[in-house]
Every structure is written in C-alpha cells, then in structure tokens.
Amino acid sequence: MAKRDAMARKQRDIAPWWRGLELRRWLRRGLALGVVLMFAGALGYAADWALRPDTLPIRAVQIEGQFHHLERRDLEAALGPYVSGGFFSVDLPAVERAAMALPWVYGVSVRRLWPDTLHVQVTEQVPVARWGEDALVNRYGDVFRPAPESLPGGLPSLTGGEGRQRSLMRRYLAVQARLADVGLEVRGLREDARQAWTIELVGGGEVLMGRGAGEVQLERLLRAYPHIAAQRDAPVRRMDLRYTNGIAVAWGEAAPVAH
C-alpha cells in the first residue's frame, strides 16, 4: 500500500509531456523576437546614419538638356540651395520644384548617382506662338511667361481670352496653310471677348472674319483675293468678310515710285 502511494506521488511530480513542447515553443518565440528587435535597432541606426547631412555629401551636380532659351547659370543658381546635404538626405522633390519654378523649364527629373552626384535632366519649353503681350504658347498649348527680354522673335501672334490658346493655335495653322495658296502670309490671329476673330497678315493688313466665321468665309476669301489683288498696285489694308455675300476692301497707299 505504501509502495503504491509512493509511485502515485512520483507520477504526480513528473510534468506532463506537452509542457516541454510548450516551453520550447515559447523559447523559439522569444529568440525570434530578440532577433527582430536587434535587426530593427541596427536598421534604425543605419537609417539615422544614412540621413545625416555629412554622410556621403553631394559633391557634383550633372545638368543635361538641350537649351536654346534657358540659361545654365540660372538653373545652377536655382538648384544651389537644394543640393546640399548627403547622398541619401538630399530632398529630390525640392530640387525638382526649384527647377520647375523657372518659366523656360517644361519638365525635370532628378536622380542620385552613387556615391556623391545628382543627375538633373531638364526639358526646355518649345515656344510655337506669342500669346498676348507678355506670354508664349508651347507645343502642347500651355501658356508660360518668361522674362520679357527672353521672348523670341519671329513667332506667330495669338491674342484671345483665357483658355482660348489651343483653339486659336489650331485655327492659325489651318488658316496659314490655306492662305499661303493665294500668296498671303499670316502673322497671327486675335479674338475679342465676343469671339469675333481677325487674321493679321504680314505687312500690316488684316482680314475681319467676325464671330462664328469658318470654312464658308475662308473659301470666299480664297476665291476673291486674286481679283482683289489685281485691282490696284496699292497694298490691301483690310478685307472685311462679316457680310453675308460680299467682301469690303480697304487699300493702303501705294509705295512711291522711285525716279
């Protein structure tokens, strides 16, 4: 009897088999957590080191692009305050914004070149027309305003209300091609607040088209102009197509004959 009681107490003192498995499971979890915490600490230290301004400082800036109106020195001056710091800490979006603030810049991309260089790729605006007195229209129909002294000459002139530049540019291209067939050179177009439009000719003449004028009026002009030009030696100062079935013509003074 005493022997059976002793064996029962011994069996009670032995831990169940599943407790050993549970202990090992918790040990593995604790070890994994420790590894994760050590890795996170090392990663945080590395990130702090990399983001210090004195870690791998930027020593060179490469600016690339084809420039006809944009001055490289203006780009360098604009980017200068934003390219200081380290290779990892330099603020790339700030560099891009600084470049985009220049009116002759259409687009820019900035990337790092290991270990100490920034590469800046710049796309310059391509002007296709003057817009009003102080602005330009680019090849995508966007208006931009560079310094007045940098406005190029020889561009067609467009004048109109806000947001009308794309429509006027398309109209200018169509009219220019058609009038060239009868020897008329188009200098530009202007549109008033009522959207009545006028063709400006090289040499100072103009064609009043009116509001809503289009292909019908243009065809009338193409048919009539050779006869109009043959009437006098004086230059045509104005042709008014705002009539239903006719054209009113005003001539300038003929050039004096040299003796």
Image (spheres, rainbow, N blue to C red):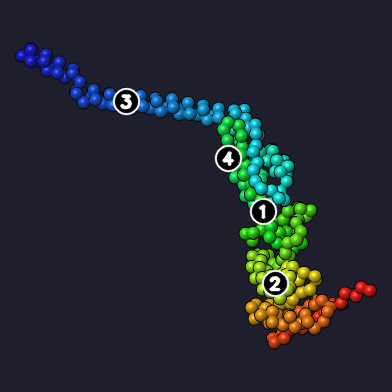
Please tell me whether mark 3 or mark 4 is closer to you in this view. Answer: 4
Residue 121 point in image, percent of width and height: 62, 44
Query: How many residues crowd mark 4 within 10 Å: few (<14), some (14–19), many (20+)?
Result: few
**N-term-proximal mark, 3 vs 1:** 3
Residue located beneath label 4 in the image: 111
Residue 158 point in image, percent of width and height: 72, 66
Left or right: 237 as drawn, with respect to 140? right
Three-letter code, disc 1:
Gln
Q: Secondary structure at mark 3?
A: helix
**N-term-proximal mark, 2 vs 3:** 3
Please tell me whether mark 3 or mark 1 is closer to you in this view. Answer: 1
**N-term-proximal mark, 2 vs 4:** 4
The answer to which of 3 and 176 lies nearer the viewer is 176
Residue 139 point in image, percent of width and height: 64, 59
Residue located beneath label 1 in the image: 125
Q: Secondary structure at mark 1?
A: loop
Left or right: 68 as drawn, with respect to 1? right
Q: CA distance from mark 2 to mark 4?
A: 47 Å
Residue located beneath label 3 in the image: 28
Q: Is residue 164 visible?
A: no
Q: CA distance from mark 1 to mark 4?
A: 21 Å
Name the quarter where the N terminus is drawn. top left
Query: How many residues crowd mark 3 within 10 Å: few (<14), some (14–19), many (20+)?
Result: few
Task: Name the residue at 62% across, 59% down.
Answer: 140
Residue located beneath label 2 in the image: 180
State whether residue 101 is above or below residue 15.
below
**N-term-proximal mark, 3 vs 4:** 3
Task: Name the residue at 47% across, 26% down.
Answer: 42
